[in-house]
Image (cartoon, rainbow, N blue to C red):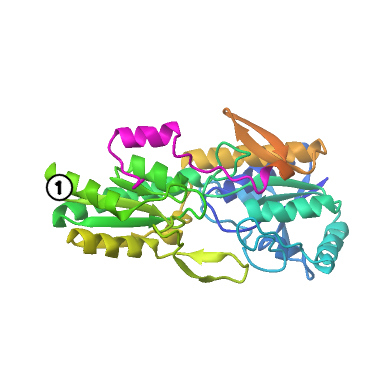
Amino acid sequence: MKIGVLNSGGDCPGLNAVIHGIVGAADQLGFEVIGFRDGFEGLLPPASFTRLTPRDTIGILKLGGTILGTTNKGHFAAKVGKGSIAEVPADIVAQAKATMDQLEIGALIIVGGDGSLTTGLQLFRAGWPIIGVPKTIDNDLSATAITFGFDSAVSTVVDALDRLHTTAESHKRIMVLEVMGRHAGWIALWGGIAGGANIVLVPEMPFCFEKLVERIKQRELQGNHSTLVVVAEGAKLPAGDLVTLDANAGGEVRLGGIGDRVASTLQTLTGKETRSCTLGHLQRGGAPTALDRILGMRFGVMAVKLAAEGKFGRMVSYQSYHVDSVPIQDAVNQLRLVQPDSELVIAAKAVGICFGD
């Protein structure tokens, strides 16, 4: 069998670990691996691909990014906003399928998030031998308990908060850290708890500035003259508005700027000097953590197992410490969101973290 693999959507720590797992497991079974460059675009004529052997993956386990490249734009964009889906044009699908047939690809492993797997589902329904591997640092896919890249992103947030603590305390300032999280606040929540934040703002929990000011004043009375705030980019202002930059070519609105808005408002309301910092793509870059290396490798191995067994139209999934699979159609458009009454939120509130609700 010839197995094709491509990375689609945003980059993510652990992508190379998945490739490492795929190539290693395929080699053990005598399969050939074809890696398509720059996502689905590599399928279009003239096809852009490379043959991958274990020799080609030596040392990539520890590397961030992806040796195959990726893109969240182009001819195969299937997501044009929350809940909105655009079909990939039939002529584009036909051109890509011609490449698949020419190379005699018996299984195509798509490593991507909700949008990429939505495209994969369309291709599967058109008769393609598709297997999905979930990829998102947001950790917001309900069909898997965790996605690789999330732990690395949280570690970056924690490192940033550790550094902001010292400068906040030195100047008695409020420091606001904006992190990724379009629809789900898992990075903000986990990073905020582990990094010792005092206020955490997530998309799922509306907040009001009066509650934040009240918490900051309480800290002042307790002798704590600095405050750390973590806000997810998708958190909405009290009026219900998202803070956006612009719309990209794929149709999804680019979020960003909520940190600055929160910082300026808090400075006005409290009179305390306030600064904001946006981590942005620092959360996507760099070497993956040990957890993401192992999880990514396991996902790659399971994807090859599904290909060998002819179980197409399925996505690799991690549940209860075990890697298995679920139908792709059950995985896409099913976001796992932070629940305000969840044990983790309750625990965070118990140690004094304010959510502004």
Q: Position of residue 28 (x, y in %)?
A: 73, 37
Quadrant containing the C terminus is: top left
Quarter location, residue 9: bottom right
* Labels in figure, total: 1
Q: Is residue 225 visible to us here?
A: yes
- Closer-to-camera residue (47/282): 282
The residue stretch that appears in magenta: 331-357
Q: Position of residue 304 (x, y in %)?
A: 73, 40
What secondary structure predominates along the stretch shown in magenta?
loop
In the image, taking residue 270 as reference, residue 281 lies left or right, namely right
Q: Residue at x 87, y 60 (%)?
A: 102
Magenta-span inclusion, residue 336: yes
Q: Residues within 10 Å of mark 1 (few under 14, many from 20)?
A: some
In the image, taking residue 35 as reference, residue 265 lies left or right, namely left
Label 1: state its secondary structure. Answer: helix
Q: Position of residue 79 (x, y in %)?
A: 66, 60
Looking at the picture, does residue 284 appear above or below residue 215?
A: below
Amino acid type at mark 1: Glu
- Closer-to-camera residue (64/245): 245
Q: Residue at x 57, y 58 (%)?
A: 10
Q: Position of residue 223 (x, y in %)?
A: 12, 44
Quarter location, residue 46: bottom right
Residue at which label 1 appears: 220
- Closer-to-camera residue (265/89): 265
